[in-house]
Image (cartoon, rainbow, N blue to C red):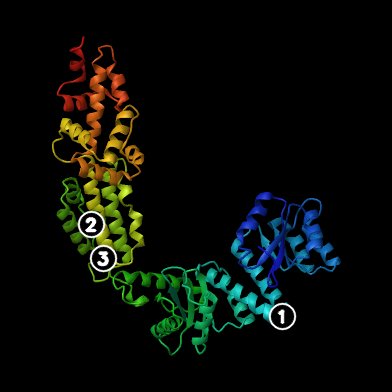
Amino acid sequence: MKPNTVGFTAVLADDEELILKRLEESVNWEELNIRLVSLAQNGKQALEAILTFKPDLAVIDIRMPEISGLEVIQRSRNAGIQTDFIILSGYDDFSYAQEAIRYGARAYLLKPVNSSELYDEIYRICLEHSRRKGPRISRLYQNKLNVSFFNKLIDSKILEPGIIQQILSSTELNISDSPCYVCVIQFDDDIPKKKPPLSADELTAALDRHFAHEKHVFWNYNARQVVGIFNISSTLPFQNAMGCLEVIRSLNLSPPVIGIGDTVSGLMECPYSYNRALTAMTYQLYDDTSRIFTSESICTIPPTLKLSDIDYLPLIQFIVKKDLEGIRTYCNDFMNRLLYVPAPPPNYVFSFCYALFHQVEKEFSDFSHNEITEIATAQDLYRFRKLSQIRRWLIDSFCQLSEFIDAVYGYATPKYSQAQKTAVESDDDLIRSAKEFIHSNITNHIKIEDIARHVHLSPSYFAIYFKNKTDVNLRDYLLAEKMEYARRALMNPDTSIRDVAYDVGYGDYRSFSRAFKNVHGITPSDFQSKYR
């Protein structure tokens, strides 16, 4: 990170390389606007770095080679350097730590270091340093620290309640540690831009102005989400959410979805309220016209349907038989069964749909060589915001799978000789190219995806394309080509049947013999005996 007028500098020192690396990675230094100027592996390096850079902060081990951490602090103080020190030590070093604190060390942390405790101590020091740099710098830095602190607060990473009181007493935040609730403002994409460009900070500033009469705080949790905490007042949470929408509309931004969490007794309990707000927003699944969702909309009636109650075998039969109407009826009935109340928990709906798709995927994976994932994956479910989208996705996915299964395998009695003849006669360029590829690579154990890759199509699309153009199942044609190669090879009485079977992709004689007889009406051994 580049230094700036608001930022601070720090030195880390520990003779154990692994611990030093963990110190570097355990804190988001850039988030705190701190630039690491040195990573020292012994006391001598640490002292040289401190004398050179005069950092605002140093995190050092009390016991290090050449010069101890305690001596580093003594010499730094003798040189008039006011660096704030955080001491790291084991239990046996407590007497050293006491002496280090007498020399002005700000904190003493036991190894292994808890990253949240380390963050809290650094946060306190940064607060004090920002105030020393004057009101403007203090205000700029405080804004950065506020974002960092409140992100950690709602992520349950603030472990010590005392730091909340310290922050409230040392800042001008318009909020108190009393009953409150979380308001989440979430945009579909990154916070939209307008002309002239609007930054996320400008959005929170506009919200702050609108709610100046309310005890609250707003900050940018991430690129898509602004989070607010409101203390309880005479204004209802829903009214404040409406106020947020008014501000956003006045800025000509596309309307977001707003979630309101439960009221909690204080700031330390905000993670619960935040997560309830996120859960409330998922109920947009049933009402995509509304923009505000409160925790009261969360369903509390437990479902009675279990995964073991779902009979997916009729769906499998519909897919195999290419009964598209049966697939539609099954999926609609399945979705209707999930709606045991008008708005059940969205996660319940997602999980059952995921489980159904997974069962079908598992059923077909063995013989479809996992091509089902070319058509759809269960993870696709989680991008949908409407129940109708999920219903349509299930129907479309299973219908496409049925088309694919039919295109590759079919469900009628195969006519292998006709399969070859029809496909060979096709004048389509893609079909001709695929046929030539198959013919040239028949002994290379090719699969459908290899053929599709050759003609630059996905396996599922190519299989359906092949069937539509030739009226032949791709598997039938590929099998016919393999058995034709085997027939010609076995006309030589000295050729090993097992070698031929392996050449066309069969690992055992029985499977090869059965396939050969299905196509040519005679076993490979009987066929070869004709030429002896």
Foreground mark, 1 or 3, reads 3
15 vs 184: above or below: above
Whether pointer 1 and pointer 2 mark residues with C-beta atoms closer than 8 Å, the reply is no
Q: CA distance from mark 3 to mark 2?
A: 11 Å
Residue under label 1, please give it: 134
Q: CA distance from mark 1 to mark 3?
A: 57 Å
The quadrant of the picture occupied by the N terminus is: bottom right
Q: Determine crowd level at label 2: few under 14, some 14-19, many 20+ residues with C-alpha closer than 10 A.
A: some
Residue under label 3, please give it: 388
- The three-letter amino acid code for the residue at tag 2 is Ile
On residue 395, the disc is 2
Q: Determine crowd level at label 3: few under 14, some 14-19, many 20+ residues with C-alpha closer than 10 A.
A: few
276 vs 316: above or below: below
Front in this rendered view, residue 107 or 345: 345
Q: Secondary structure at mark 3?
A: helix
Q: CA distance from mark 1 to mark 2?
A: 64 Å
Q: Secondary structure at mark 1?
A: loop
Whether pointer 3 and pointer 2 mark residues with C-beta atoms closer than 8 Å, the reply is no
Front in this rendered view, residue 105 or 419: 419
Task: Give residue 497's position: percent from left, percent from top.
Answer: 27, 18
The answer to whether residue 162 is visible is no
- The three-letter amino acid code for the residue at tag 1 is Gly
Residue 129 figure quarter: bottom right
Q: Is residue 349 left or right of residue 217?
A: left
Residue 134 figure quarter: bottom right
Front in this rendered view, residue 303 or 486: 486
On residue 391, the disc is none
Q: Secondary structure at mark 2?
A: helix
Task: Give residue 301's position: percent from left, percent from top.
Answer: 28, 70
Sequence-wise, the earlier of marks 1 and 2 is 1
Front in this rendered view, residue 215 or 269: 215
Sequence-wise, the earlier of marks 3 and 2 is 3
